Amino acid sequence: MKLSSGKKLKSPNGIVARPTTSRVRAAIANKLKTTLFNARWLDLFCGTGVMSCEALEQGANSIVAVDRNHHLIQTAQTNLEMVQANISHSASIAIHQAEVLNWLEKQVEKIKAFDLIYMDPPYKSKIYDVTLDRIASNRWLNPNGLLIVECAKSNFPKENNDWKLVEQCSYGSTTILYLHLKEHCHDGIDSRQQQRVR
């Protein structure tokens, strides 16, 4: 497993994981390159931490990663520390082994809101909608922040009163959704029309 820069990362031994593909990671990193510098990044269902590593390498100065799997969290910690040791800017890293929904409720008074939130639950899970609700209701995203959701083409989150779709990009069987909180959107554009298939 490698970053867009070519840096090798650790993969978990004997664990079935579905890390975001290099093609999708490169596309996301390219789209966010102007917003990652000095950003606060939250990675939900982080797995091996590969997306957080991309964010860290691209200039994020605060990384928080959450996953319930002990072995994946250990791998994420190793990967993030390797990247942290080789970047030129200072950055903080916090890794949490926890159920994501519980963490979003219990940590809300302890941790500041984020500029960028990335969530990548298991594709066949039923957890997308409740996670979106919890991020919005607990105000985890800054007013001008962006939520990035990775999902399967066949398992879209439902329309949500809290979120406005800014852009939708498809890469094979994977879809990436970019969302803003509706309460901070003023352009009135029906952004579900802004779709790209690659």
Image: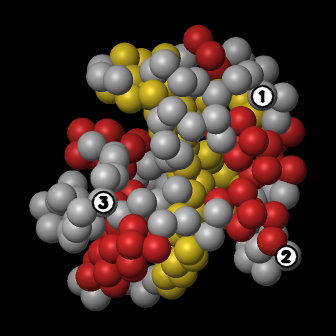
Q: Is residue 142 left or right of residue 11?
A: right
Q: For this rendering, which residue is in front, 132 or 55?
A: 132
Q: For this rendering, which residue is in front, 6 or 129?
A: 129
Please rate how many residues cluster around mark 1, counting C-alpha atoms within 10 Å: few if below 14, some from 14 to 19, many from 20.
few
Secondary structure state at the residue bearing disc 2: loop
Which residue is painted at 85% across and 76% down in the image? 109
Please rate how many residues cluster around mark 3, counting C-alpha atoms within 10 Å: few if below 14, some from 14 to 19, many from 20.
few
Vertically, is 147 above or below 1?
above
Secondary structure state at the residue bearing disc 1: loop
Task: Name the quadrant of the C terminus.
Answer: top left
Which residue is painted at 45% across and 21% down in the image? 153
Please rate how many residues cluster around mark 2, counting C-alpha atoms within 10 Å: few if below 14, some from 14 to 19, many from 20.
few
C-alpha separation, residue under disc 3 versus residue under disc 2: 33 Å
Residue 170, image x, y percentages: 39, 23
- Residue where numbered disc 2 is placed: 109
Which residue is painted at 39% across and 68% down in the image? 72
Amino acid, disc 3: Ile
Return the disc, 1 or 2, that comes first in the chain's sequence.
2
- Residue where numbered disc 3 is placed: 15
- Residue where numbered disc 1 is placed: 160
Return the disc, 3 or 2, that comes first in the chain's sequence.
3
